Structures are given as structure tokens and as C-alpha cells.
Image (tube, grey):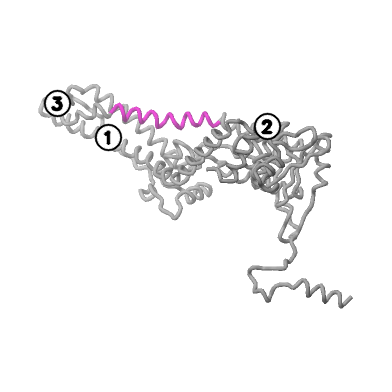
């Protein structure tokens, strides 16, 4: 939903043919220059706009006539994302344990079905009415895990599960089944947070002025002569472009040039943003082995059950076990999928990690380019030095946490200083 200011701004953009400058908007829409620049950066980022450098060196903003549909689509995506984030944790936990529950239920159904068929056919065999079916004995094995490990209850199951995985501690078996099937989620879930953190630290370490090439090691955007990829950076950190006489662009971020105090310590920055490779699973080896063995046992049992039903199908139709003829194919398909899904995922990890390595390589190449800049980049960095500044706020003349009588009186201080001189 657009604010009144944004609506007024975009109406002004439409009237002026979708190509405007900060001054155009300030004059036509009645906004201050600072407000016009900030809102133009924001709307260009959201509505698919781009920056253009005129021959005179001034900055123009070019918008598309379809800006409303672009905004509507982004707003709809944001609403769905917000809804998903609000319910994701609960749904994911229930989804994780459901696969383990299904595996155990499948094994129980197969075991009870085989036992029921065995009892029924053996009883009828003694009466001479049923087929002679010999299952060769049934064996049950206990794999050594505690039933109390099936669930883990804690204040935050999601954080506790990740902590246990990272520290190599045993996890609940039901969650281990999910990990065996689908893994443990995106290892780069906080990538955006790290990205913006490193961009901000890079700007700060360069005293609030950068060339666009200096943030490329933290973005996934290829080199673009128009430097449109800088729009989200300008919006997020309230920056403004500066144009040299040669048409080169640098970007100044006044708010990141101000500090409350001079600590003399710069926050650490990385040369480039590095994504982590995907892992098959973070669950302990014992849990994965147990899940695989139970999955194989489930498929073997389902296959055996289906084969036996095919042999005695006509007999089952005359008993209360006729429903097994319908459920046995479902159990067999489930058993096949249980082993196929992790196998396919295992083979897909290679190409996925190749993409991760490729993106890391591109960002690393940008970092290397920065360490050995060409003449064009050196010219931009030299131009940026003219806007470098670092302001450390003084003690201040007013503190809302103090009483008025405790505030500094600058007039009195100045008067006393004059008397002493």
C-alpha cells in the first residue's frame, strides 16, 4: 500500500513521462529535496526503476509505465511471505515428525498384517479350508534407541535441534527421519542478513563513500554499467549518488559517516560474501543408519506382503482381511519413495554445491579486482575521497535523560571563557 507521499510522487512521475530528476519531483510534488531523493530511491527500487546519468552529469530516474503492476506483485509476494513466516516454524516441526510417524506406522501395519495372515491361514490350514502358507518364522530386532528420543521438548525446538546437530548430540529419531529424507534446510538462511551487514561495514570502513564495485563482492548481481544494483543499497542506507566530471558515479552515505563516539575500532569486514555448501544431513550417523535400515526393512516387508497377497488373494476376499489387498500397493509405493527421495537428493547435492561454488567464485573475483583496480576504478576512488568525512558527535548540549538544570549552558561557558581570556 502506497503512502500519500509515494502516491503523490508517482503521479508526478507519470505526468512527467516516467523520467524525472530530484528537482523535478521537489518542484512538481512539493517535497523537500531530501525527501524527494529518499522517496525516489525507494520507489525506483520497489517499482523497477533505474538510474541514468545525463550528459551534464545530473542523475535522472527512469520508471516503467507498468510500475503499479510491479508494485502489486511485490506487495502480494511480501504478504504471502509474511504469512508463511508466521506459521513456518510450527508447520515445519509437525512436518518433520510426521515422516517418522508414518515410517513407524507403516512398519507396524506390515508386521500386524503378516501376523494376521499367518494366524488366519494357519488356523484355516488346520481346518483344511485355507492355503498352505509358511512364512518361515518372524524376527523382530530392537535397534537400541530409547522411545524417549522420539520427541524432544524444549523452549524452542527449532533452535535446540540446530544446536544439537551442530554439537553432534543425539536427536529425536522422528526428526532424524526427516533429516534423512529432506536434510536440514538452507545452510545460508541468514545470508541476506550477513550480506547487508558486510555492505554496511564496507561503507563505514571507507568513511561513508564508495564506488559501486566495492559492494559487488557481497551481491549476486553481475557487473552492470548502469549500476542499477546500487538502488537497494541507496534505499537501505539512505545514500545519494555523486557524479564526477567524467561521468563516474560514487555513492555517499551521510548517516554512516557519523559516530556517537570515537572508539578507534573498525568492525571486521570480509573480502567477499561466502555461501556455505549444502550437506546431506546434520543428524548423527547412528540416526541416519537407523532410518536407512528401517526404510529398507519397510520396503522389504511391503514387497513381501504384496507378494503374499497376490498368492492368497481369492482366499482374502472371503475373510475380514480383504482390505489388505488395497493398502499393500500404497505401502509398497511409500517404501520405494522413502529410499528414492534421499537417494535423488544425495545426487542433486553435487550440482547445487557447484552453483554455490560458482557464486562464491564470482564474488571472490570481484574482491580480487578491487585489490588490483584498473584506471577507471582508481579514478572513481580518487573522486570519492572528496566526499570522505567522519563526524564524531560531541557530548551534546541536551540529554533527554537529564533534568533541565543539569544541561550544559553554552552561553555561560562562552561568557566565562571570554572573561578568562
The quadrant the C terminus occupies is bottom right
Q: Nearer the viewer, residue 94 or 113?
A: 94
CA distance separating discs 2 and 1: 62 Å
Write down the region rendered in magenta: 328-349
How far apart marks 3 and 2 lie (CA) works out to 70 Å
- How packed is label 3: few (under 14 Cα within 10 Å), some, or many (20 or more)? few
Q: Is residue 265 above or below residue 347?
A: below
Instruction: Judge whether residue 340 is colored magenta.
Output: yes
Q: Which residue is mark 2?
A: 222
N-terminal of the pair, mark 3 or mark 2, is 2
Label 3 with label 1: CB-CB less than 8 Å: no
- Residue 92 appears in view: yes
Percent across and percent down for residue 161 are 47, 48
Which quadrant of the structure image shows residue 96? top left
Which residue is farthest right? 421
Residue behind mark 3: 318
Query: Within the magenta stretch, is there residue 303?
Result: no
Indicate which label's residue lies in the foreground, 3 or 2.
2
Q: Foreground residue, 307 or 343? A: 343
Give 108 or 67, whichever is nearer the viewer.
67
Q: Is residue 192 left or right of residue 293?
A: right
Mark 3 or 1: in front is: 3
Which residue: 60% across, 36% down? Answer: 47
Residue at image location 73% in from the left, 54% down from the top = 266
Q: Residues within 10 Å of mark 1 (few under 14, many from 20)?
A: few
Q: Earlier in the sequence, mark 2 or mark 1?
A: 1
x%, y% of residue 369? 76, 35
**Label 2 residue SS:** loop
Rendered location of residue 39, percent (x, y): 64, 44
Q: Measure the C-alpha gap from mark 3 to mark 1.
A: 25 Å
Q: Which residue is mark 1?
A: 138
Amino acid at each position: 500500500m502506497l503512502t500519500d507521499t509515494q502516491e503523490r510522487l508517482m503521479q508526478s512521475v507519470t505526468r512527467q513521462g516516467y523520467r524525472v530528476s530530484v528537482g523535478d519531483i521537489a518542484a512538481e510534488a512539493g517535497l523537500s529535496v531530501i525527501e524527494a531523493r529518499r522517496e525516489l530511491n525507494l520507489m525506483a527500487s520497489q517499482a523497477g526503476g533505474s538510474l541514468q546519468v545525463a550528459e551534464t552529469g545530473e542523475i535522472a530516474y527512469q520508471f516503467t509505465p507498468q510500475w503499479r503492476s510491479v508494485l502489486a506483485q511485490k506487495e502480494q509476494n511480501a504478504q504471502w511471505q509474511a504469512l508463511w513466516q508466521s506459521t513456518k516454524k510450527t508447520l515445519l516441526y509437525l512436518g518433520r515428525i510426521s515422516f517418522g510417524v508414518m515410517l513407524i506406522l507403516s512398519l507396524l501395519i506390515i508386521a500386524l498384517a503378516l501376523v494376521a495372515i499367518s494366524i488366519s491361514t494357519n488356523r484355516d490350514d488346520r481346518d483344511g479350508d485355507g492355503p498352505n502358507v509358511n512364512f518361515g518364522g518372524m524376527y523382530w530386532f530392537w535397534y537400541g534407541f530409547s522411545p524417549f528420543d522420539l520427541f524432544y521438548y524444549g523452549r524452542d525446538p527449532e533452535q535446540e535441534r540446530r544446536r544439537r546437530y551442530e554439537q553432534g548430540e543425539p536427536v529425536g529419531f522422528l526428526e532424524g527421519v526427516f533429516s534423512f529424507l529432506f536434510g536440514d534446510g538452507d545452510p545460508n538462511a541468514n545470508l541476506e542478513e550477513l550480506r547487508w551487514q558486510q555492505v554496511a561495514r564496507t561503507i563505514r570502513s571507507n568513511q561513508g563513500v564508495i564506488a559501486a564495485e566495492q559492494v559487488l563482492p557481497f551481491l549476486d548481481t553481475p557487473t552492470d554499467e548502469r549500476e542499477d544494483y546500487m538502488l537497494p543499497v541507496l534505499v537501505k542506507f539512505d545514500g545519494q549518488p555523486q557524479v564526477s566530471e567524467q561521468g563516474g558515479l560514487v555513492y555517499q552515505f551521510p548517516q554512516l559517516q557519523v559516530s556517537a563516539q570515537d572508539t578507534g575500532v573498525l568492525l571486521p569486514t570480509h573480502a567477499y560474501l561466502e555461501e556455505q555448501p549444502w550437506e546431506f544431513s546434520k543428524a548423527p550417523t547412528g540416526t541416519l543408519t537407523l532410518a536407512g535400515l528401517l526404510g529398507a526393512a519397510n520396503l522389504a516387508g511391503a514387497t513381501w506382503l504384496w507378494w503374499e497377497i497376490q498368492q492368497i488373494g481369492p482366499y482374502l476376499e472371503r475373510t475380514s482381511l480383504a482390505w489388505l489387498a488395497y493398502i499393500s500397493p500404497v505401502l509398497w509405493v511409500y517404501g520405494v519413495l522413502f529410499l528414492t527421495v534421499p537417494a535423488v537428493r544425495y545426487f542433486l547435492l553435487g550440482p547445487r554445491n557447484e552453483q554455490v561454488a560458482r557464486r562464491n567464485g564470482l564474488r571472490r573475483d570481484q574482491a580480487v579486482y578491487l585489490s588490483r583496480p584498473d584506471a577507471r576504478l582508481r579514478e572513481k576512488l580518487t573522486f570519492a575521497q572528496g566526499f570522505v568525512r567522519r563526524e564524531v558527535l560531541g557530548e551534546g548540549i541536551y540529554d533527554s535523560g537529564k533534568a533541565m538544570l543539569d544541561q550544559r549552558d553554552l552561553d555561560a561557558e562562552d561568557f566565562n571563557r571570554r572573561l578568562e581570556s
